Amino acid sequence: MEKIVNFLDLDGYGQFIWTAYGLTAFVLIGILVQSLRFQARTDAELAALQGTLEAANGESAGRETQA
């Protein structure tokens, strides 16, 4: 048990090292969440634009067959 405590203490620098690891993990998780939310938003926007484009193409194709 003492070896584990000594390892986690890291010769007195453990508080700084583990804080840095924690902050790094927090930032990386935040970037991952932000990226996934941005991707979902842009996928929805793309789907909406493609639906608008398909609707516009369908209307123009319908006019061509009627003419």
Image: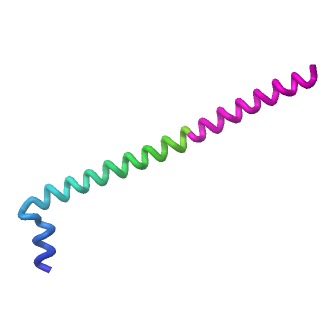
What segment is highlighted magenta in the picture? 43-67
Judged left or right of residue 36, residue 20 is left
x, y percent for residue 65: 91, 25
Q: Give the quadrant of residue 52.
A: top right
Judged left or right of residue 19, residue 44 is right
Please name the residue shown 59% across and 36% down the image: 45
| Residue 35 drawn above or below residue 12 | above
Quadrant of the drawing holding the C terminus: top right
- In the rendered image, residue 55 lying in the magenta stretch gets the answer yes
| Total marks placed | 0
Considering depth in this image, is 30 or 63 the residue closer to the camera? 63
Quadrant of the drawing holding the N terminus: bottom left
Q: Which residue is at the far right?
A: 66
| Residue 30 drawn above or below residue 2 | above
Question: Is the image coloured rainbow, by chain, by secondary structure, or in one colour?
Answer: rainbow
Please name the residue shown 81% across and 24% down the image: 60
Chief secondary structure of the magenta portion: helix
Q: Give the quadrant of residue 10.
A: bottom left
Q: Give the quadrant of residue 61.
A: top right
Please name the residue shown 67% across and 34% down the image: 50
Q: Which residue is at the far bottom?
A: 1
Please name the residue shown 80% across and 30% down the image: 58
| Residue 66 drawn above or below residue 25 | above
- In the rendered image, residue 44 lying in the magenta stretch gets the answer yes
Q: Which residue is at the far top?
A: 67
x, y percent for residue 66: 93, 23
| Residue 19 drawn above or below residue 7 | above
